[in-house]
């Protein structure tokens, strides 16, 4: 009787049961605040094809983006003109400087004429400095505008939630709801493969990777994917172990797992 009980315990210790779960669940959270204008409940439980299934209102973002793009084009045109003006001033200053250097020591030229040439040269130099200052201001404005445009583009992108080849596991918001950054929007599942999770004690782990895995009494070529190095908090003295398998037709299917 004792021998029979020991045999039964040994058999049960080598049999494990686990549900086939999606390979990974991703929780999608809001990066921006706003009003939900679309939350497609009809897609819940279905495979997503890449379209937007949640949309947060971006009307003001789109208007500001269009306005800033026009301003940016205007700034760029102004920059182009001022750069050309600076080039012209450089040529003018060179010529005026030559004229001034030529007459400043001529005794036949009066001091009034010399002063006039000098002040004309100085005035042109100051105009060039003013133009250079304006060019620097435009560069700064363009940098600020480009940064704001990038922020708006990211905000608009963050307001259009999509996924491809994932199953919409749960939709956590509804149309008309106001969301804040960090709020959960949806959970999507990667169903490209499945995972089986079991808990093995230290003795069961010995040479476990050299053993063949049987699922529902059928021999497989599957191998253990992960073994957690620390014992589980709930399953005392047991170690979480994960096996990856092909995606089944029906998830949550129960599998009997054996190592032989």
Image (cartoon, rainbow, N blue to C red):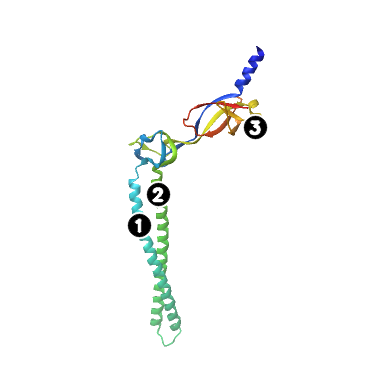
The x and y percentages for residue 99 are 43, 81
SS type, badge 2: helix
Q: Which secondary structure lies at badge 1?
A: helix
Above or below residue 200? Residue 140 is below
Foreground: 236 or 210?
Answer: 210
Front position among marks 2 and 3: 3
- Residue closest to the eye, 10 or 41: 10
- Disc 2 and disc 3 in contact, CB within 8 angstroms: no
Neighbour tally class for label 3: few under 14, some 14-19, many 20 plus, Cα within 10 Å = few
Q: Residue 69 vs residue 200: left or right?
A: left
**Label 1: few (<14), some (14–19) or many (≥20) C-alpha neighbours in 10 Å:** some
The residue at which mark 1 appears reads as 71
Of the 4 image quadrants, the one containing the N terminus is: top right
The residue that disc 2 covers is 153
Q: In which quarter of the image is residue 207?
A: top right
Q: Which residue is drawn at 33% across and 50% down?
A: 63
The crowd level at tag 2 (other Cα within 10 Å; few <14, some 14-19, many 20+) is: some
Q: Quadrant of residue 35?
A: top left
Visible in this render: residue 235? no
Identify the residue at image location x=41%, y=64%: 135
Q: At x 45% / y 83%, what residue is drawn?
A: 102
Residue 239 percent location from the top left of the image: 60, 28
**Label ID, residue 210:** 3
N-terminal of the pair, mark 1 or mark 3, is: 1
């Amino acid at each position: 009787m004792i021998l029979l009980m020991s045999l039964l315990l040994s058999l049960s210790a080598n049999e494990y049961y686990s549900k086939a779960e999606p390979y990974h669940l991703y929780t999608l959270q809001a990066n921006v605040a706003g009003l939900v204008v679309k939350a497609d409940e009809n897609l819940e439980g279905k495979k997503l094809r890449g379209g937007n299934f949640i949309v947060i209102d971006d009307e003001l973002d789109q208007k500001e983006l269009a306005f800033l793009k026009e301003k940016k084009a205007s700034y760029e045109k102004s920059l182009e003109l001022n750069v050309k003006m600076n080039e012209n001033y450089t040529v003018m200053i060179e010529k005026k400087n030559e004229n001034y250097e030529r007459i400043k020591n001529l005794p036949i030229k009066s001091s009034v004429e010399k002063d006039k040439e000098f002040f004309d040269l100085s005035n042109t130099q100051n105009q060039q400095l003013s133009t250079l200052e304006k060019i620097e201001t435009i560069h700064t404005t363009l940098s600020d505008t480009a940064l704001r445009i990038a922020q708006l583009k990211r905000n608009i992108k963050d307001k259009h939630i999509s996924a491809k080849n994932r199953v919409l596991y749960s939709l956590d918001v509804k149309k008309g709801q106001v969301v804040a950054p960090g709020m959960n929007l949806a959970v999507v599942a990667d169903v490209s493969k499945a995972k089986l999770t079991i808990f093995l004690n230290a003795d069961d782990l010995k040479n476990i990777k050299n053993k063949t895995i049987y699922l529902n009494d059928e021999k497989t070529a599957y191998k253990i994917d992960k073994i957690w190095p620390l014992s589980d908090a709930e399953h005392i003295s047991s170690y979480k172990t994960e096996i990856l398998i092909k995606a089944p037709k029906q998830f949550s299917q129960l599998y009997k797992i054996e190592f032989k």
